[in-house]
Image: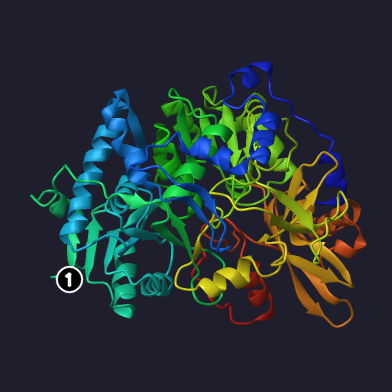
Amino acid sequence: MTEQTFNSATSEWYYPSDDVVKHARVPDYEAMYAEAERDLEAFWGKMASNLDWYAPWQKVLDQSQAPFYKWFVGGKINIAANALDRHVKTWRKNKLALIWEGEPGDKVTLSYWRLWKETNKFANVLRSMGVRKGDRVTIYMGRIPEIMIAMLACAKIGAVHSVVYGGFSEQALADRIEDAQSKVLVTADGAWLRGNIVRLKDTVDEAVRRSPVVETVIVVKRTGHDVTMEQGRDYWYHDLMGLPIASPNCETEVMDAEDPLFILYTSGTTGKPKGVLHTHGGYSVYTSTTLSCVFDIKDEDRYWCAADPGWITGHSYIVYAPLILGATSVLYEGAPNHPYPDRWWRIVEDYGVSILYTAPTAIRGLMRFGDNWPNRRDLSSLRLLGTVGEPINPEAWRWYNKVIGKETCPIMDTWWQTETGGFMITPMPSVPLKPGSATRPFPGIKVDVVDEHGNPVPTGEDGVLVIQQPWPGMLRTVYGDPDRYVSQYWSTYDKQGWYLTGDTARKDEDGYIWIIGRNDDVIKVSGYRLGTAEVESGLVSHPTVAESAVIAIPDEVRGNVIYAYCILRTGVERSEELKDALKDHIRHEIGPIAVPAKIEFVDALPKTRSGKIMRRVLRARAQGLPEGDTSTLEE
């Protein structure tokens, strides 16, 4: 954000109501944080006792082979047992686990009992296909209930799932299949998005041709369009689920706490896919604890994480943590503005959604359509809001608070990563908020903002965000490449034993953390370093701009100059006069050094599956260079 906006936002407080604090699961953040600081292992042991274990752990944390930390050593557990098995033994067996709506308007509801049965059946199908404990299964499909069933079925039998986002290209999918060495792939014929069919099976056919390690492809019939089914390799999901092999009873595999649960390939890489590995024990404890405390899940809630199960937010906070907590979740297949810009707000109204968790890029996208669309809908069921995926600019935060939350819903602005497994810096409903800040670390998490030598930077200055002690939800390694795990995350501050997040941040005088952006998202103009987020936030603060992205391009005189891409709000006309006005606006907001040399108006920006702008693609396009690996582009 701009210096002016930062200085203003740091002193802009939003306090929760007395009623929110009174009924919050964690009414006193300071006390909980102090408890974790006094005895980290006792704190996480206490949190772990909320789950069901086949056998207790002998040691909470083993640091003997750091940075290859181990959590709940000797403990026996299975995440599927905590997400499903234990609930069907209680009154929750008839509670709704999932409310699903397809983009065309079709609907499915699954109770915990039915989801457990469907998971058992598919787990037995996988076993009949030769899948055993430790085998990898690749999953490639849209936002449909079967993606959750497939993930849970893998976990239940001890297989390691590798979910690949359904918008990835043939080569991206082939690379991930090859890296995981998956012999079984679960997909769908297609998915609905913006009224069109995404032809998933066609992509799978080409990916399997390029990576022939796959022996079996299981296909869910979603869109019903014609697809090629190769005899002996391809099977319809519904056919298999109707066979005697699909027994509704399936024994859950007893797993060690450190046994692998899933591999998830991170976005934005330019080389070999980087498979982040998470495990059953620590991940179960961490995701369920963070969701319980931050979103204050109660049995009467209808919770909607509007992400995709194909990335980490979906793994942690659509599939696993909500089910562990016995929550009722909403899942929607399609685009937020199809067929009209009130689609999300209608879903909130129709299902009585009480908690909504989404990305700033989606919020800004819906802001473009104005206030009338959400104001037509009854959003009074909402009590908490959340954001994830990137820093939220104060303007979008205020709109979300005022127009969607009606100034009564605390906003949980969460910072975390694929690698961290769950929320790291986040408020709780009882914590005072500042628009644009993720506030302070979750209890048990220790972070700081430091310089290149590891020294804390002065208040209000940019520095490198580091995590200073291990946590249960942390990645255990990069799949098949432990050296890369050490070099990428632990070697920069190896003497201190700190985890390098790769993000730039600031800390204000109240200890609140402000995420600026990735360390490599920095522009140097005439020797001055400018964060891309700072210039982008300045552009978005102009009333005509909905979203922006800026890059540096070479300049003979200044070394680099700024090239800005802007998406305008609905109804705003493009003109040279507007470009001049935006340059004047930046000159006023940030200073002459930040004024873009060129501004281009566009309809869309290249983004990853998690909503992050791929600036390297913009740089390549601006300079007429090869774009490199674009497999992580959403579209």
Which amino acid type corresponds to the residue marked 1 in the rendered image? Answer: Glu
Q: Is residue 275 left or right of residue 447?
A: left
Front residue of 452/36: it is 36
Pinpoint residue 126: horizontal percent, then vertical percent.
21, 57
Q: Residue furthest front?
A: 58
Front residue of 279/365: it is 279
Pinpoint residue 536: horizontal percent, then vertical percent.
75, 56
233 to 63, vertically: above or below: below
Q: Residue at x 32, y 45 (%)?
A: 145
SS category of the residue bearing label 1: loop
26 to 84, vertically: above or below: above
Residue 498 appearing in the image: yes
Q: Is residue 160 left or right of residue 562?
A: left
Q: Quadrant of residue 397?
A: top right
Q: Which residue is mark 1?
A: 230
Q: Residue at x 72, y 56 (%)?
A: 465
Residue 635 appearing in the image: no
Front residue of 582/619: it is 619
Pinpoint residue 53: horizontal percent, then vertical percent.
37, 40
